[in-house]
Image: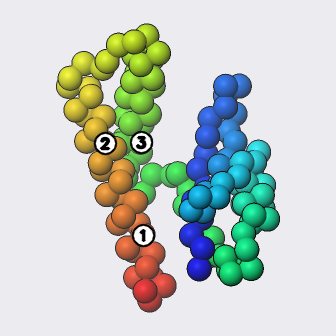
Amino acid sequence: MTKVAILPIPTEQGALSYHAIAGAKHAQGKTAGQALDALTAQLSADEATTLVIVQSLRPDRFFTAAQQERLATLMARWRTARDQGQSLPIDEQTELEALIEAELRAAAARTSALADALGR
């Protein structure tokens, strides 16, 4: 079974586009569906069996609204600093790295919970 990730990508105009990835193959679209369709067209018959799981970016028991808001704030500050050739203050960089790690752990916990719900 082919595993596909679909990532929202902010555009310069402030909208979102979507990038679908399956191994070395990738496609982009204005919607997640368009990106998935464009990627699916590239897959061989052996790769065509896919399971699509849509994870909303809403807060949940694994990564709270407060964590999401703080992560967004720190990422915006990090981008601004990067664009100006600077770095975040050490305490903010440390907090940002901890939130990224927490988000990664939350994704793993969500995946485990989903696998349990599907009976692994």
Q: Secondary structure at mark 3?
A: helix
Q: Who is closer to the viewer here, 38 or 111?
A: 38
Residue 50 sits above or below residue 92 on the image: below
Q: Who is closer to the viewer here, 14 or 1?
A: 1
Question: What residue type is disc 3 on?
Answer: Gln
Q: Who is closer to the viewer here, 32 or 37?
A: 37
Q: CA distance from mark 1 to mark 3?
A: 18 Å
The residue depicted at 43 percent of the width and 79 percent of the height is 115
Q: CA distance from mark 1 to mark 2?
A: 18 Å
| Mark 2 neighbour density, 10 Å: few (under 14) some (14–19) many (20 or more) | some
Question: What residue type is disc 2 on?
Answer: Leu
Q: Which residue is the site of mark 2?
A: 99
Residue 85 sits above or below residue 74 on the image: above
Disc assigned to residue 90: none
Residue 114 sits above or below residue 64 on the image: below
Residue 29 sits above or below residue 108 on the image: above
- The disc, 1 or 2, on the residue closer to the chain's N-terminal end is 2
Which label sits in the foreground, 2 or 3? 2
Q: Which residue is the site of mark 3?
A: 68
The residue depicted at 67 percent of the width and 25 percent of the height is 12
Q: Secondary structure at mark 1?
A: helix
Q: Which residue is the site of mark 1?
A: 111
